[in-house]
Every structure is written in structure tokens, then in C-alpha cells.
Amino acid sequence: MNGKKYLVTAASILLCIALFFFIITFSIGLPIYVRPFYYAHIKPMELAETSGYTGDEIIAAYNEVLDYLTLPGKDFSAGEMKYSEEGAAHFADCKVLFDLNVSVLLASSLVICAIKVLERIKGFKCRLCGHRPAFFAGIAAVVLPVVIGALAATDFDRAFVVFHSLFFPGKDNWIFDPRTDEIINVLPQDFFMHCAILIGAGVIILSAAFIIYDIVDKKQKRS
């Protein structure tokens, strides 16, 4: 009996952690893998007018950069746009983070699936203090966008600099010269702010869904 209790507790904690990382990495992936999100910014932000490139050329450049960042074995390219060695080096640094995010997303997904299979085989349900692990994962995950969003809302420019200082320590190649790295002309800071908003919205929606599901499930069992 004690053995099963320990198994349930260990599986529940592991599931809670996996769900937390799933929420975060899935949400980070939204602006990365949903490319129409970027395409929708081209006209409103007048990127063709300010960059001197056509909408099709901008989309082609963006797709080549994203292919490099998200697909294996791709060399860096920015379509018709010029880029420097330092600019390409920064995207190489970004690729490391992109690969890390998708690796954590896949790993957390596998852990979640494995624990769900274990629940069926062993005939138990993961619970922590009477709640599903998704409840605590949702609460933990939703704290991040609230705190970060509050800080970014007060000074996004400062938050943007702090972000790059944390994830690219000791480097300044993320400060692009628009004359030598033309891709930055079609990646304005406002676009990255919108990406942050989308990520925050994804975290909040997923977290809320997990929390509400747990609350509804508990009420149904009581009735």
C-alpha cells in the first residue's frame, strides 16, 4: 500500500513539473511556429514601406530565418536581405534557445503521455492535496506572465535589454546595424512586444483551462 502511495505521489509531482514546462514551452512556440502571426504585422506596421522590400520578399526572408532557427541542417540566410557575420552569429545563439525550447516541449509531452499510460496500467489517478497536478502547474505557470508582464508594461525597452543580457550574457551582437543586417528593419521592437503578449496570453489561457478543469472535475465528483 505504501509503495503505491509513493508511486502516486512521485508520479503526481513529476506530472505537475512536466505540465508546467509544457505550458511555458508550448506558449513560447506560438509566435515561432504560427508564422501567419508575423505575416499579419507586415501591412499594419508598413514594413514594406520602411524597409524598401516587397511583402513577398519580407515573407521569404522571414521564412528563411525561421527555417534556420527551427529546422536541422539549415545554413543561415535572410533571403534578399544583407546580413553580417555578427548578425548571423546572434541567430546562431538564438537557435540554441529555440532548440532548447522544442526539446523541453517534446520531453514534457513524453513525460505527460508516459504518466497517463502508467495511470491506466496501475489503476490510479495522480493527485496532490486533493487536486490534479494540472491545477498546481497552472497556478505556477500563470505567475510568470503576470510578474514579467507587469515589469515589461512599465518599461518594455528596459525589459528588452534585460532579456538579452540574461540570455546572451557578455554579447552585444543582438544590437543590429540596419545597414548591414537588414532583417532588423522588418523585425521592429513592437513585433517582439506582440510576441511577448501572445506568449503571455497562451500561458494564461492554458493555465486557466487546467485550473478550471480541476475545479469542475471536483464539483462533479461531489455532486
Image: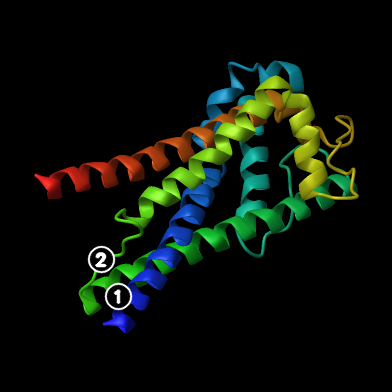
Q: Amino acid at mark 1?
A: Leu
In the rendered structure, find residue 185 and report the number of the disc placed on it: none
Mark-to-mark CA distance, 2 and 1: 9 Å
In the rendered structure, find residue 125 and report the number of the disc placed on it: 2
Above or below — where is 139 with respect to 7?
A: above
Q: Position of residue 143 (x, y in %)?
A: 53, 39
At 35% from the left and 67% from the top, the residue drawn is: 113
Q: Residues within 10 Å of mark 2 (few under 14, many from 20)?
A: some
Q: Quadrant of residue 48?
A: top right
Foreground of the two, 29 or 8: 8
Q: Quadrant of residue 58?
A: top right
Q: Position of residue 28 (x, y in %)?
A: 55, 45
Q: Quadrant of the C terminus?
A: top left
Q: Position of residue 6 (x, y in %)?
A: 37, 77
In the rendered structure, find residue 118 and report the number of the disc placed on it: 1
* Horizontal side of residue 172 vs 78, given as left or right: right
Q: Quadrant of the N terminus?
A: bottom left
